[in-house]
Image (cartoon, helix red, strand yellow):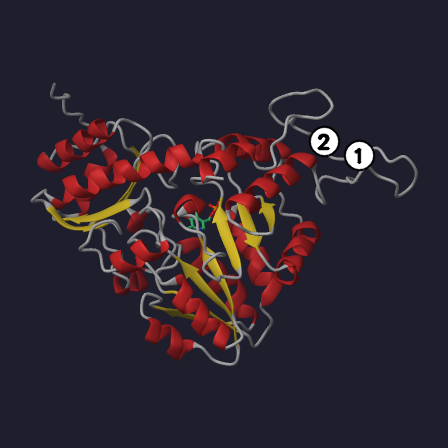
Amino acid sequence: MHFATRAIHASQPSDPSTGALVAPLFQTSTFEQEAPGLTKGFDYSRTNNPTRQRLEAVLADLEEGRDAAVFASGLAAEHAVLQAFLRPGDAIILPADVYGGTWRLVSRVFAPLGIDARFVDTTDLAAVGAALTARTRLVWIETPTNPRLHVSDIAAITALAHGHGALVVVDNTFATPVFQRPLALGADLVVHSVTKYLAGHSDLIQGAVLARDPAVFEPVRFLQNAAGAVPSPFDCWLTLRGLKTLELRVQRHADTARRLADALSAHPRVARVYYPGLPSHPGHDVARRQMSGFGGMVSFEWQGSAEQVADFVSSRRLFTLGESLGGVKALIAQPARMTHASIPAERRAALGLTDALVRLSPGLEHPDDLVQDLVEGLDAPCAGRGRIAPLAV
Ligand SMILES: *Cc1c(COP(=O)(O)O)cnc(C)c1O
């Protein structure tokens, strides 16, 4: 069955007791027991809840996993994975340009507990190979990365990591299971910020962990209940709703991203465009091999002062200045001052995260309108903050 069909039908039968087409929302903290310990499969909603269970079944199906556990945020999901597998003395390899929140979690929470965190360029297989040791427990891949959309080879890194007895975790937030299935490529665990494309409407915060091997998944499930960073039933219900249109949405996001990448590439004020779908992108070949689409995110560097860039991102009519991505409304960000501000300035400079870098998350607006909004701003880079140029008809 095709992905779009599974997103609507898998694990989503009509409600057996009423016939309701859409799964009911079980907004309850606890469940009546018939006798002490005798339940209908649910006792307390931290441990399990029917709405959450249904969401987990749908996610597992879409990612080609066996099991899924959802969490109150993407970082709570990541925390559970790190906590489940890392012990003092263990090492973890991560991309040098990993999501800023992941960098903070590993370097500020886990490194002080005696975890050896090695940030390497995971687009370079030799660099990953050189960093692997007998102590490496986890190899963390994020592909494409945020915000420069670097692409790492999941199957090749997995082969290297497994040769050293390490598990591979892939942050699949940017690609989504529509375009990339890391578990089918050999990875052991997938993590998601469900907040982004999966939920898709910028109205909730949620995370997920997926796995194929029950032995790998079990400690994550244990921590979901033991540490308790679970999402509300209502947020699970909203994600179930969002997932039904996931395929339709991300195809449109990707089509628009391509249109924007082409328009930006042709603009004289743009120094560089980052989009894995462009043949000039260094990760293009790997992306073509392991992805069925190039995703909805585009970044670019433009030729202008930091102030001009700040002014540009603050004064678009359709791209709202804000963090996050993957919703129906277009967002624009200056990562160095926003999403990646928690990374120390020297480290940002080493990673090439300059003030001139702009990140775009096109929404589901018409692509012509989004292209026009950007090009207008590039053509008139000195418009003052908040000043809005009239729409050319
Ligand atoms: C947003 C994001 C996260 C963190 O997820 P939250 O839901 O914000 O906790 C992790 N990885 C990537 C790639 C992200 O974009």
Q: Is residue 277 above or below residue 133?
A: above
Few, some or many residues within 10 Å of mark 1 (<14, 14–19, 20+) = some
- Specify whether 135 is left or right of 30: left
- Specify whether 199 is left or right of 385: right
Marking on residue 31:
1
Q: Is residue 251 above or below residue 64?
A: above
Q: Hey, which residue is sitting farthest front in the picture? A: 1
> How far apart in space, not on screen, are marks 2 and 1 (Cα)?
8 Å
Of 206 and 178, which appears nearest the observer? 178
Residue at position x 65%, y 34% in the image: 51
In the image, residue 53 lies at what x, y percent?
66, 40
Q: Amino acid at mark 2?
A: Thr
Ligand 1 closer than 8 Å to the CB at disc 1?
no
- Specify whether 265 is left or right of 345: left
Q: Is residue 14 above or below residue 49?
A: above
Q: Is residue 96 above or below residue 145?
A: below
Tell me the SS state at disc 2. Answer: loop
Tell me the SS state at disc 1. Answer: loop
In the image, residue 388 lies at what x, y percent?
18, 25
Q: Hey, which residue is sitting farthest bottom in the picture? A: 134
Q: Amino acid at mark 1?
A: Phe
> Quarter-wise, where is residue 58 in the image?
top right
In the image, residue 266 lies at what x, y percent?
10, 43
Q: Hey, which residue is sitting farthest right in the picture? A: 35
Residue at position x 51%, y 37% in the image: 6
In the image, residue 306 lies at what x, y percent?
19, 48
Question: Quick check: can you spot residue 117?
Answer: no
Residue at the disc numbered 2: 28
Residue at position x 15%, y 21% in the image: 391
Marking on residue 75:
none
Tell me whether circle 2 and circle 1 mark residues in contact (CB < 8 Å).
yes
Question: Quick check: can you spot residue 276?
Answer: yes
